[in-house]
Amino acid sequence: MPLSEQEQRLLDEMERNLYRNDADFVAAVSGRGRPNYRSIVVGVLLAVLGIGGLIAGVALQLLVVGIIGFAVMFLGVLLAIAPSRRGAASAPADPARPTASAGGRSRGGFMDRLNERWDRRQEGG
C-alpha cells in the first residue's frame, strides 16, 4: 500500500531532521560501502577449520583440541561479520546530508518539533 503525499512528505522531513540532528547515529547504522570479501572468505574458512577442530576434539576426547577449535571457529565468525575498516575511512561524504555541528540545535530537538506539531493538530481538530 503506497503512502499518501502527506505521509511521504512527513517521512522525508523526518529523515532530513534525523540526518541533520543525529549525524553520528546515521553514520553508525548506514552502510559503509562495499563489504570486504577477503575477510569474509578467510573468516568462513577459519570457522570451518574451527568446527573441524571442535569435532576432532570431541571425537578424540581431547579438551585442549576442542577448546582451540572453538576459539578458531569463534574468531573466524567474528572476522567474517566484522565491518570493513577501510570502507568507513574511504566512504565519501554526502554533501546533501549536513553534519551536526556544535551549535546546530538552535530550534530545539526533533522530538520537540514533532510534539509541537502533534499538539497543533490536536487543537485544530
Image: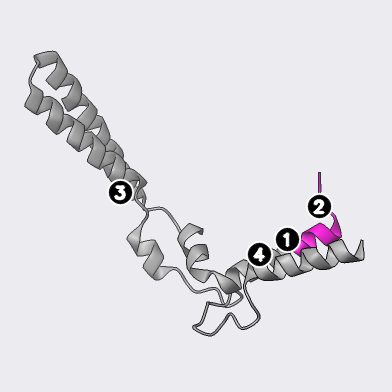
Residue 55 versus residue 77 in the image, above or below: above
Q: Quadrant of residue 8?
A: bottom right
Numbered badge on residue 3:
2
Counting other residues with Cα less than 10 Å from the Cα at mark 3, is it few (<14), some (14-19), or many (20 or more)? Answer: some
Observer-nearest of 82 and 105 = 105
Q: Pinpoint residue 24: horizontal percent, then vertical percent.
A: 48, 68
Q: Residue at x 41, y 53 (%)?
A: 35
Q: Depth-wise, is mark 3 or mark 4 nearer the camera?
A: 4
Q: Is residue 75 above or below residue 36?
A: above
- Which label was assigned to residue 11? 1
Mark 1 residue type: Leu
Tag 2: amino acid? Leu
Q: Nearer the viewer, residue 100 or 119?
A: 119
**How many numbered marks, from 0 up?**
4
- What is the span of residues highlighted in magenta in the rendered image? 1-10
Q: For the C terminus, which image quadrant?
A: bottom right
Is there a contact, CB below 8 Å, between mark 1 and mark 2?
yes
Query: In the image, what residue occupies the spot 13% across and 32% down?
Result: 68
How much space separates mark 4 and mark 2, taking CA atoms?
Answer: 15 Å
Tag 3's secondary structure?
Answer: helix
Return the residue at label 3. 39
Q: CA distance from mark 1 to mark 2?
A: 9 Å
Image mark for residue 15 = 4
Q: On the rendered structure, is 53 left or right of 15?
A: left
Residue type (three-letter) at the residue carrying disc 3: Ser
Disc with the residue nearer the chain's start (1 vs 2): 2
What distance separates the C-alpha of mark 2 from that of mark 3? 40 Å
